[in-house]
Image: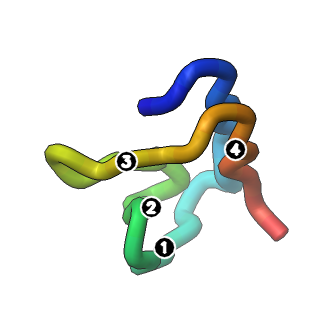
Amino acid sequence: MGEGVISHPFPAGAELDAEDRVVRDGIVVAPKNTLRHPGKYIEPE
């Protein structure tokens, strides 16, 4: 992950499939070799 990337937890039971991440039961998982820009925030909407 890039420098300064902040990942906040999602609510329990949350499910999401995005290009740069997946969320399973509220846990954020970054696929291998995923690039994140410095300063990116990962959080529920």
First reached walking from the N terminus: tag 2 or tag 1: 1
Question: Dot 4 corresponds to which residue?
Answer: 40
* Marks 3, 1: nearer the viewer: 3
Q: CA distance from mark 2 to mark 1?
A: 5 Å
First reached walking from the N terminus: tag 1 or tag 4: 1
- Between 16 and 11, the residue placed more toward the observer is 16
Q: Residue furthest right?
A: 45
Question: Dot 2 corresponds to which residue?
Answer: 23
Question: Dot 3 corresponds to which residue?
Answer: 35
| Amino acid type of the residue tagged 3 in the rendering | Leu
Quadrant of the frame with the N terminus: top left
Question: Dot 1 corresponds to which residue?
Answer: 15
Q: Is residue 15 above or below residue 1?
A: below
- Between 24 and 5, the residue placed more toward the observer is 5
User: Label 4: how many residues lie within 10 Å, few (<14), some (14-19) or many (20+)?
Assistant: some
Image coordinates of residue 17 in percent, x first then y, are: 41, 79
Query: Judging from the image, what secondary structure is the residue with disc 3 in?
Result: loop
Q: CA distance from mark 4 to mark 3?
A: 11 Å
Q: Residue at x 83, y 70 (%)?
A: 45
| Label 2–label 1 contact, CB within 8 A | yes
